Each structure stands twice: as C-alpha cells, then as structure tokens.
Image (cartoon, helix red, strand yellow):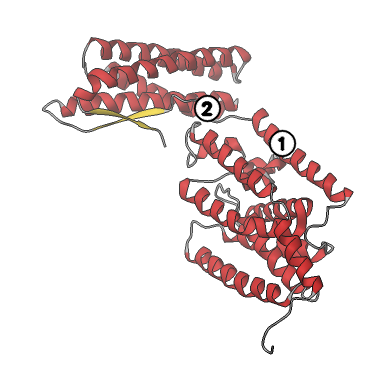
Amino acid sequence: MSGVGVLEQRDYEFVVGLQRSPVRFTYILLGINFLLFVLMFFAGGTTNNDTLRAFGAKWNPAIDKGEFWRFLTPVFLHIGILHILSNSYALWVVGPQVERLYGGGRYMLLYLGAGIAGVGASYYFNPQPLSAGASGAIFGLFGALLGFGLRHRNQIPPFFRQAVIRSVLPVIGINLLIGYSMSIVDNSAHIGGLVAGGLIAAMLPFQPPGETDGGGFRMFQAVTIGAIALAFFQVYRHYDGPPISLNGYSVSWTPSDGGARQTRDFVSVINEAQEAFDHSITAIASRETPRVAESMNETAAALDHLRRAPSMDETADSLIQDLLDVMESQYKIQQDVGRAGLVTFDHEIRARENMRRNAEIRRTFRDWVDTEGRRRGIELRQKK
C-alpha cells in the first residue's frame, strides 16, 4: 500500500516515552505562582510598588546593595491578574511539553536558568522600573523547544521535529513583536530568557523521553527546590512591605440622597487615614528613617482631616475617635524614630499594637457599613 508511512521502532519508542513521561514540576511552579499572588493580594495588592519590592521583585537599588536573591524571586511574582493569567496559560501549554522532553531535573535547570537570565537582562538593559514575572522563564522554554528540535533533529521523529520548529518560531516572533509594541513589556527579560533557554538546551545531553533522570539531575531537583526556598526565606527575613491581612478593605460610595456630600467627605477621611496608617507601618518595618520621616507628613495630614471629619451618627463618631487615637499613637512613634535616628525594637512593638487596634477598627467599620452605612450609600470594596 503506497502512500502510508510506517513509524520506525525508535520513533515509536520516542512517542510512547513522551506520552508516559510524568509532569510534576510545571504544576508545582504554577502553584507557587498563584500562592504568592494571593499573599501579595492581601498585602496591599499585586500592583502596589511597596508590596512588589517587599516580595522580591527585580529592583536594581536593592540588588546593588547585595540582595542577589532578587535574580530568582521575580520569576515567581506577577503584576496584576492579566499578567498571571497570561503567563500561567503559556506555562500550562508549553511547560508539560518541555518537562516530558527533558525530565524533571533538566526542566528545572532550563526554567530557573532562563528565568534568572531574563531577570539579569532586565537588570542590565532595563534598570529603572520594578519588574517581575515568569515570562523570561517561559521564553526560555520556547527557546529550549526550538533548540531541541534543531540539535536533536537526527534523533527524534521527523514529524515531531517539523511540528516543533513550525509551531515555536511563529509564537516567539509574535510575542517579541508584541513586546516591542508595548512600552510596559520588559522585552529584555524575554530575549534574555529565550537566549538562555536555547543555550542551556544546546548543552544538555540527549535523554530519550521516559528514561529516568541520572543521579546528578535528581540531585539538581533538590538543589533547585532548596534555592527557591532559600530565596524566599530571604524575602521573609527582609520583608518590609504592607502587613498581610484579610482586613484589607477600603470604601467606595454611591450617593443616594441629599447627604451625599457629607458621606463622600466621611468616606474620604476614613480612606486617607487607613492608607496613611498602612504606609507608616511599611516605613517602620523598613527600618529606614527617611521613609519614616516621609510617612510622618502623610500621617499628620490624615490626623488633621480626621479631626474635621463630618458627624454621621454615634457609632461612626466613636469610630472616628478610635481611629484618631491610633493615628496619634502612630505619629508619636514616627516622632520618636526621628529623635532617635533609628527604628528600635520598642518602636516595632508599639507599631504592632497599633496594627492590632486598627484591625479591630476596620472590623467595626465593616459591621457599621453592613447596617447604617448601606443606608447612606456606602459600600465596602476589597483593596486592589
């Protein structure tokens, strides 16, 4: 029967081995990304610069001071919901293919190597803004697929080689074009990851899919997991961002009666005070006296507005007074830091007590909104 191709034994074994190869690390990486995204969401938001810096985003001034773990941690952080969804989808699509081709140990070498190279390229070629994301590592996986198809073209089935090359090249080209057309995209990280992925793939020895990783690569799996854990332990040790709290709420309003102006003023005062409080906590946690001094001005303005807040009802007036007491206490801590020239352990203890008190005030405010506040057109919304 002419025109019917017969799959050679070697090619058949390749296809079967590819199908049977396990996929573990792609899903672990996705889980880490989403876990950190949720933690950042409850620590001021994933687009908050203070939160991004505290969680280990690429930030050249910190790296220049010796925070070298920031070459790794940005690979697991994302800025906004669209960012993490787009990168997660790309990793979901390409990750299993590369992991099946290379095995767990080689896959982690490719992913982290390309990710670190992407951050390094961003550090050198795009030094100014904060940046984060898995896209450099994902471009590295595309580069690895392309490199695999070219380097091992005589060892893999022809149809597989052609499919890889024909599918990967357009994807790389389109995404680079999109990156160059959008100023917010850090294309230096993409190119750095792409090149690193291709180079690492060119150096890795060929191992037919389905075969067990050697002892060296199994050890590398443990090393990479340890490196990730160590990097985020450093983030934990040096954390100076907003506190992670389920009470991260602010307010918005929908004026519904003649008292809308009064309602807006009341809501504005509450929001301003809570934002100033959060910034003051972040500044004290950073132990940087210039940041504390800067946040003190914001606290002073919030205090002045709290003292002139409109009266709503007895419960709301009591809430304003409680918040005023906490903000005054926080202002005194900031003054003490300025006089001492440093943040002491006593300052941190007092700030933590104010955090506890402020959390109670926020809970009370939620309860008030659920009853009287809604009648005045006030609604709670989760802080972004």
For image coordinates 51% across by 23% down, the residue present is: 281
Residue 147 drawn at (x, y percent):
73, 69
- Above or below, 305 relative to 202: above
Q: Quadrant of the N terminus?
A: bottom right
Residue 229 disc label: 1
Query: Residue reaching furthest left?
Result: 258
Question: Can residue 359 be seen here?
Answer: yes
Residue placed at 62% from the left, 16% from the top?
344
The image position of residue 17, as x and y in percent, is 76, 61
Q: Amino acid at mark 2?
A: Ile
Q: CA distance from mark 1 to mark 2?
A: 19 Å
Residue ID at (73%, 79%): 6
Q: Is residue 209 above or below residue 312?
A: below
Q: Is residue 222 left or right of residue 328?
A: right
Residue located 68% across and 84% down the image: 4
Q: Residues within 10 Å of mark 1 (few under 14, many from 20)?
A: few
Q: Amino acid at mark 1?
A: Ala
Element on which disc 2 rests: loop
Assess disc 2: are there few (<14), some (14-19) or many (≥20) residues with their C-alpha within 10 Å of its C-alpha. some
Q: Residue furthest bottom?
A: 2
According to the image, label 2 marks what residue? 244
From the viewer's side, name the closer residue of 263 and 346.
263
- Is residue 59 visible from the viewing direction of this image? no
Front residue of 195 and 31? 31
